[in-house]
Amino acid sequence: MNELTLECMMNPTLYDKYKHTYDPIYEKEREKDIEKYKQKIIHTTKLMFTHRSSNDSLNNAFNHYVNECISTYKAKEMQKQPLPEHPPYQKDISLNYALQEHSKTITMDKFIKKKKINNNKI
């Protein structure tokens, strides 16, 4: 397929991924664009907190970005919190079972049949 067909027929996001995969020059161009539009991007991001855009894909991208940020921050907060201290056998069922089994005494009564021997000889 030629470049023009791909550009016209593909979804723009998918086409950008395709172009990025097969064109290393695209990455340099993207970095230049980021530097060029950096202030506008920051301004748009600030506005998105208070107003919705008429562009649905921009709204979806912003919501996805915010959700990813929030989940990352929550995960980092959870990592910083100390683990609650509790006895190890209190909530762990498998350890409780192991303790109960260890405390039992095993007898052979369940496995061996005992015969009574009469000592009454005449």
Image (cartoon, grey):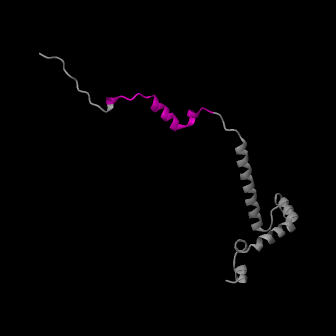
Q: Nearer the viewer, residue 119 or 56?
A: 119
Nearer-the-camera pick, 35 or 39: 35
**What span is in magenta?**
86-109
Q: Residue furthest left?
A: 122
Above or below 33: residue 77: above
Q: In which quarter of the image is residue 118?
A: top left
Q: Does the magenta segment cover residue 27?
A: no
- In the depicted structure, whether residue 72 falls above or below residue 89: below
x then y, percent, for residue 75: 70, 48
Q: Is residue 22 above or below residue 86?
A: below
Q: Horizontal placement of 91 versus 81: left or right?
A: left
In the shown orientation, is residue 120 left or right of residue 43?
left
The foreground one among 47 and 113 is 113
What residue do we see at 26% from left, 27% from top?
114
Give the position of the C terminus as an image quadrant.
top left
**Quadrant into which the N terminus falls:** bottom right
Measured from the top left, where is residue 80 in percent x and y? 72, 43
Residue 37 position, x and y percent, is 86, 67
Quadrant hosting residue 25 = bottom right
Magenta stretch: dominant SS? helix
Say if the magenta span includes residue 93.
yes
Residue at horizontal 18%, vertical 18%?
Answer: 119
The quarter of the displayed image where residue 26 is located:
bottom right
Q: Image point 84% across, 69% down: which residue?
A: 32
Number of labels in the image equals: 0
